[in-house]
Image: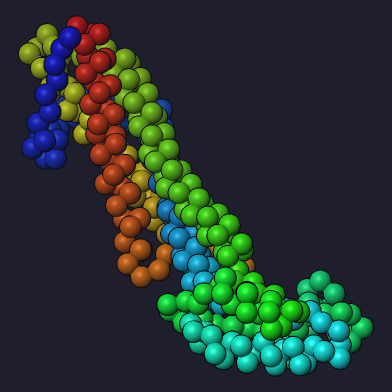
């Protein structure tokens, strides 16, 4: 099998005579540029989704980890006394920074999405909710539950752990899915560039044979194809990244209500990350075309 060595200096500077070996336009050229642009465009959105999911997971984890809720379920004539008793226990509980009972308007706002804004709380056996914010070191949830059960039988502690863990896990998996999607897009670019390079080499088999007869080495021929396809991939990826960054920039800003749906954007230095996609795409094309050139030129020997 023919061994093809690559000369990086010639790959960077180029060779006008060698470039004539590769057709400057045609199906393979258009396919490489389009594939690189499309994959880079999708990779930017996959990256934005992954970063947004990471921010969402961190926000959900921080917000829910620092808050807990106590529900006071008791007859109407006892609920006020049990609420005050629960608040008194929380005032003496280590690790609890703040606790307060939600007023009627706040509880009505919580139930409005399901029962409407005109809900009459007096007509329903709605429990009294107590909002509790914990300190950084946290509190003893098991000990607090035992104390509430002994002194306030109608009070139940919800530390949000059953809600927090699935949400954070889901956001974490979504972030992983974004990075996996980016890797798959890179693999797709490699596959398409490899097919395009093989097609171009096969289509120019007669030209390659003539070049060999006049003394051209396989390294010289391979470098022409590798350089041309790497530049095509770089140019296409640059177009795709620029279009994707503009599309991401005009998306609606982050909203607490919509979460990930309106937070699909880059923040701070994360805007620099998409700029690495064109060089990476060119590197993928460089490697893929090199492999295709070695194999194809070996078969044409």
Relative to 141, does residue 20 appear above or below in the rendering?
A: above
Picture coordinates of residue 198, whole percent (x, y): 32, 20
* Vertical placement of residue 2 versus 51, above or below: above
- Residue furthest right as drawn: 123
Image vertical order of residue 167 relative to residue 4, above or below: below
Instruction: Point out the residue furthest to the front here.
Output: 150
Q: Nearer the viewer, residue 122 or 27?
A: 122
Q: Quadrant of residue 183?
A: top left
Residue 250 visible from this viewpoint: no
Determine whether, in the image, residue 184 is placed left or right of residue 152.
left
Q: Please give left or right for residue 192 compared with residue 279 in the image.
A: right
Residue, x 49% and y 63% (percent of image)?
Answer: 57
Image quadrant containing the N terminus: top left
Q: Residue at x 74, y 88 (%)?
A: 82
Q: Residue 256: image x %, image y %?
A: 58, 73
Kindly indicate the quadrant of the structure image that contains residue 110.
Answer: bottom right
Q: Residue at x 46, y 43 (%)?
A: 181
Q: Tell me if I can see residue 174 in this picture.
A: yes
- Give the mark count: 0
The percent coordinates of residue 270 (x first, y second) are 35, 63
Left or right of 12 in this view: 173: right
Residue 145 in percent (x, y) is at 62, 74
Quarter of the C terminus within the rendering: top left
Q: Nearer the viewer, residue 243 or 120?
A: 120
Closer to us: 15 or 75: 75
The quarter holding residue 289 reads: top left
């Amino acid at each position: 099998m023919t061994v093809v060595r690559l000369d990086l200096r010639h790959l960077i500077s180029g060779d006008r005579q060698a470039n004539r070996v590769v057709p400057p336009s045609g199906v393979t050229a258009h396919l490489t540029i389009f594939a690189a642009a499309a994959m880079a465009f999708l990779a930017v959105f996959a990256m934005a989704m992954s970063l947004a999911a990471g921010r969402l997971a961190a926000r959900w984890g921080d917000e829910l980890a620092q808050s807990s809720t106590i529900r006071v379920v008791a007859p109407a004539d006892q609920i006020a006394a049990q609420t005050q008793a629960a608040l008194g226990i929380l005032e003496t509980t280590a690790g609890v920074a703040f606790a307060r009972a939600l007023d009627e308007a706040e509880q009505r706002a919580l139930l409005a999405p399901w029962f409407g804004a005109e809900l009459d709380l007096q007509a329903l056996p709605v429990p009294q909710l107590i909002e509790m914010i914990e300190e950084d070191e946290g509190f003893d949830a098991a000990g607090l539950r035992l104390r509430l059960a002994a002194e306030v039988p109608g009070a139940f502690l919800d530390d949000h752990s059953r809600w927090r863990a699935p949400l954070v896990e889901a956001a974490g998996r979504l972030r992983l899915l974004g990075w996996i999607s980016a890797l798959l897009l890179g693999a797709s670019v490699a596959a398409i560039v490899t097919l395009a390079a093989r097609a171009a080499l096969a289509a120019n088999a007669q030209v390659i044979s003539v070049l060999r007869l006049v003394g051209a080495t396989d390294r010289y021929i391979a470098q022409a194809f590798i350089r041309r396809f790497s530049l095509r991939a770089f140019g296409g990826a640059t177009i795709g990244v620029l279009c994707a960054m503009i599309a991401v920039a005009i998306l609606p800003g982050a909203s607490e209500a919509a979460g990930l749906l309106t937070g699909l954007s880059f923040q701070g230095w994360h805007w620099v990350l998409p700029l690495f996609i064109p060089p990476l795409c060119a590197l993928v094309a460089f490697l893929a075309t090199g492999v295709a050139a070695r194999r194809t030129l070996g078969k044409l020997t």
